[in-house]
Amino acid sequence: MTGSRVLALGHYQPSGVLTNDDLAKIVETDDAWIRSRVGIRTRHVAAADETVDSMAAAAAAKALAGSGLAPHDIDLVLVATCTATDRSPNAAARVAAKLGLNAPATMDINVVCSGFTHALAVADHAIRAGSATNALVIGAEKFTDVVDWTDRTTCVLVGDGAGAAVVTAAPEPGIGPVLWGSVPQMGDAVRIEGEPARFAQEGQTVYRWATTRLPAIARQVCERSGITPADLAGVVLHQANLRIIEPVAERLGAVNAVVAKDVVDSGNTSAASVPLALSKLVERREIASGDPVLLFAFGGNLSYAGQVIRCP
């Protein structure tokens, strides 16, 4: 095998929905203010008994069911998250236990909002190196656990959920080369710190960096896969803010692509946002099997990672 491909996708969102009007009862805000600044209409909020690993397992079970593989076929589980409460067992181990997997390697990956695209690259590398054959790659977050509900600049942004992909060895690569990196000197622009941990960010700093720097980096991702932005059938950026997604997609030049805008209904779900949005696009058949799709995430640590995949 010379590469890997995404075989199937799945997602999970809690049934609880928080609207902008609901938020207006908690903090000084309103629907028009939120929509004009971030484009978000609703977000899903996990119940007290819904955890990062339970949401991850639900999304992974859906992806596994769609893959045609059996639980014992999975030999690697990666969970991208920054909001798991417990350190050990990690979320990946708990997912493996819930799904009845047989002796897989299990690792959590914390690169905050770009965690899933980092984890997808790690799975691709492991399969190419021969240390894994079939992987579950999951992004899952309970971001509402770490938000300050008195801070209207951040509490309007976040939501909970999970998205998952089954990745398998393939004779022809279906996952292109990753381009990843960070801006460590600006890492404090997005933070989850303290006790209890709370999410904070320098919104304008992140906005300026994302809208000015990321289009060129995203074009480089396409170049590494040997395609142009015009060749893309889909663009799935980290669902941080509609005011970031729309200008970055426009400046990228993906004129023929469906651009994911799940942020409108789901809010910012951090590491879950890319697989969640991608799974929905595929489920709605807005992108056809085999189509090239750019996955590109950015955020915490001012880190970024992206690759072009072939749609399952």
Image: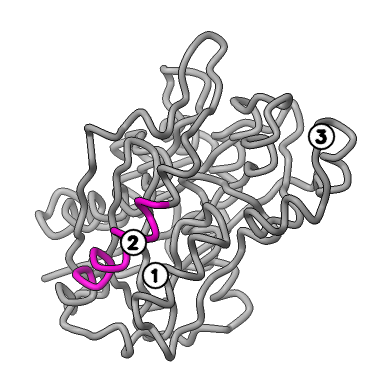
> Which of the pair 127/283 is nearer the observer?
283
- The quarter of the picture where the N terminus appears is bottom left
x, y percentage for residue 239? Answer: 52, 56
Identify the amino acid type marked 2: Val
Identify the amino acid type marked 1: Leu
Q: From this view, report whether residue 262 is shown above or below residue 80.
A: below
Residue on which the image places disc 3: 28
Tag 2 and tag 1, C-beta contact below 8 Å = yes
- SS for callout 2: strand
- SS for callout 1: strand
| Disc 3 residue crowd, few under 14, some 14–19, many 20+, Cα 10 Å | few
99 left or right, relative to 135: right
Can residue 136 be seen here? The reply is no
Q: Residue at x 54, y 27 (%)?
A: 199
- SS for callout 3: loop
Give the Cα distance between marks 3 and 2: 44 Å
x, y percentage for residue 15? Answer: 79, 48
Q: Residue at x 88, y 47 (%)?
A: 21
Identify the amino acid type marked 3: Glu
x, y percentage for residue 50? Answer: 69, 33
276 left or right, relative to 183: right
Please report whichever mark, 3 or 2, sits nearer to the chain's N-terminal start. 3
Please report whichever mark, 2 or 1, sits nearer to the chain's N-terminal start. 1
Residue on which the image places disc 1: 7
The part of the image, by quadrant, that contains residue 311 is bottom left
Q: Which residues are magenta?
A: 208-221
